[in-house]
Amino acid sequence: MLWVIPITHWKKFALNLTSGSDELIETARMFPHIEGVRCITVTSGCGGATSDCETMCDVLAAYADHPNVIGMTVFSLGCEKAQQKMFKDALARRNPEFDKPALYFLQQEWDSEERMMQTALQQTFEAMKAVKPTERVEVPLSCLKVGMKCGGSDGFSGISGNPAMGLVSDWLTTLGGASGLAEFPELCGAEGDMVKRCINLEDKKSSSI
């Protein structure tokens, strides 16, 4: 898998990125050891709080460092708050030994956006040719970490959706994996069940109401 990563939100840029990705996706089919090209879109990074931009860069760095990802092409405007350095710093914190192919393009350094995109496509193609074939290997479920996200609260959330995901989380954690919960306000009324599942006394005390 190859990632195409923008580190800021700009509609026109996102449209160009998406149209260019079609060519990359067709190119990826020439390389049987690359399963595809995925273009990430973001909705922040241009402004806002520094901490929010840092969090976004941390998430993008985690995507880049995923073992199934063979490389990345990163785009930015140059005027955004989430600068390329912020993303590189996040990547270095996550994995100081990161050595996958990485191409960076800063829009303000080019006199033509079209020329920048053409160069990005060409260099990404060359990088894909240079990637060494790898093989998938089986790993235990203890290596799996699942992040839960609210799918929109409705009448079925408490009847089927949440209980089903809770059961899957129980199975996964029993096998040594991990399940991350989001939107803690929706745990209202379930605090007792959560506290009972704490595996150490300190967490249990800090979670008790």
Image (spheres, grey):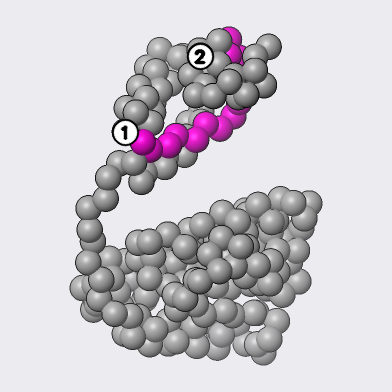
Read off the magenta span.
176-191
Q: Looking at the picture, how far across and down is residue 123, in whole percent?
A: 45, 87
Numbered marks: total: 2
Q: Looking at the picture, how far across and down is residue 59, in whole percent?
A: 56, 54
Quadrant placement of the C terminus: top right
Q: Looking at the picture, how far across and down is residue 93, in whole percent?
A: 61, 62
Looking at the image, residue 7 lies above or below residue 75: above
Looking at the image, residue 84 lies above or below residue 195: below
- Asked if residue 181 is among those painted magenta in the image, a careful observer would answer yes
- Depth check, front residue: 172 or 162: 172
Kind of residue at badge 1: Leu
Quadrant placement of the N terminus: bottom left
User: In the image, what residue occupies the spot 58% across and 20% down?
Assistant: 201
Answer with mark 1 or mark 2, whichever residue precedes in sequence.
1
Q: Is residue 41 visible?
A: no
Q: Which mark is residue 41?
A: none
User: In the image, what residue occupies the spot 69% across and 56% down?
Assistant: 54
Q: Is mark 2 on a helix, strand or loop?
A: helix
Q: Is residue 159 visible?
A: yes
Q: Name the residue under label 2.
A: 196
Q: Is mark 1 on a helix, strand or loop?
A: loop
| 124 lies left or right of 192 | left
- Asked if residue 182 is among those painted magenta in the image, a careful observer would answer yes
- Depth check, front residue: 167 or 156: 167
Callout 1: 10 Å neighbours few (<14), some, many (20+)? some
Image quadrant where residue 206 sits: top right
Callout 2: 10 Å neighbours few (<14), some, many (20+)? few
Q: Name the residue under label 1.
A: 175
Looking at the image, residue 174 lies above or below residue 35: above
User: In the image, what residue occupies the spot 47% across and 68% down?
Assistant: 4
